[in-house]
Amino acid sequence: MHPLAFPGANIPADALPPEIVAEALSSLTPFATDLFMPRYEPCEVGRWQLRVAPMLVSSGYWSPAMMTTGTAALFRREADGDPRCWMSMTPMEIESQEIGVRAATGHTVVMGMGMGWAAVNAALRPEVTRVTVVELDPDVIEVNRRIGLFDQLPAEAVAKIVLVNADALEFRTAEPTDTLMTDIWLPINGDERMEQSRAMRATPARGGSMSGARNWQ
């Protein structure tokens, strides 16, 4: 279960006496990374909702439980009416995505925009010359526009980014690609993931509307 989705996640921060909270958290190391952490604000577009938790305790893929503050997560309201988390800025998500980010070079293609963290960090790398972000749902693109994601980047990083509103399984840019990062699934694990990733790499270029990130303003 996602740490922002468990029952009681909306309990007010002052529901417990401060001294009890302080004692419980005193042994935890605050989460930190040398990668860029955007500022996220609560936002809602269509079925998507961006939430920000004041404080969480969360473990990473290889890190122990750590304290995080101002942790954002992107939820989608499903057919049954319940929201499900598709991405978050928890240590586990960051540690899983930073592998691709740190290895990114040249023309990097990011399949699935989510909260844009992988895309913006790739664009900040001097080794990356261009970042193509392929996102199927225009509402996800709109969430990132409303929170001013690219406004937080230097102009030279923004100039590298192109958004494509298209299906990741049907789109491939005609420009040679050096790095491919795929993250379009919920859940992330599945028998078909490898085959779908191969399809994203091999499918001929198709249609899809492109928009430069600088045109958001």
Image (cartoon, rainbow, N blue to C red):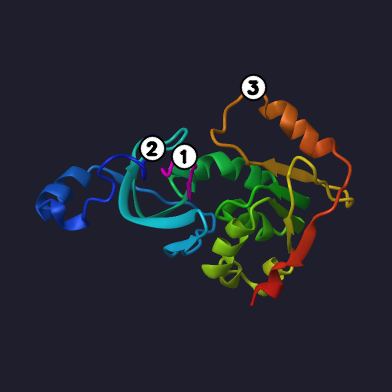
Q: Which mark is residue 59?
A: 2
* Magenta highlight on residue 77: yes
Q: Position of residue 187 (x, y in %)?
A: 54, 33
Q: Position of residue 94 (x, y in %)?
A: 51, 45
Q: Is residue 72 left or right of residue 121?
A: left
Residue range in magenta is: 76-82
Q: Residues within 10 Å of mark 2 (few under 14, many from 20)?
A: some
Q: What residue is rendered at 70% in x and 73% in y?
A: 214
Tell me the kind of residue under disc 1: Met
Q: Residue furthest front?
A: 80
140 or 32, which lies in front? 140
* Magenta highlight on residue 73: no
Q: Is residue 10 left or right of residue 59?
A: left
Asked which quadrant contains residue 164, the reply is bottom right
The tag earlier along the polypeptide, 3 or 2, is 2
In the picture, which quadrant includes the C terminus? bottom right
Q: Secondary structure at mark 2?
A: loop
Q: Which mark is residue 22?
A: none
Q: What residue is rendered at 78% in x and 60% in y?
A: 209
Q: Residue furthest top?
A: 191
Tell me the kind of residue under disc 2: Ser
* Residue 105 in sight from this viewpoint: no
Question: For the residues marked 3 and 2, what is the alpha-carbon distance in whole angstroms?
Answer: 25 Å
Residue marked by disc 1: 92
Q: What residue is rendered at 80% in x and 55% in y?
A: 208
Q: Which mark is residue 191?
A: 3
Camera-side mark, 3 or 1:
3
Q: Main secondary structure of the magenta part?
A: loop
Q: Are marks 2 and 1 in contact (CB under 8 Å)?
A: yes
Question: For the residues marked 2 and 1, what is the alpha-carbon distance in whole angstroms?
Answer: 6 Å
Q: Are marks 3 and 1 in contact (CB under 8 Å)?
A: no
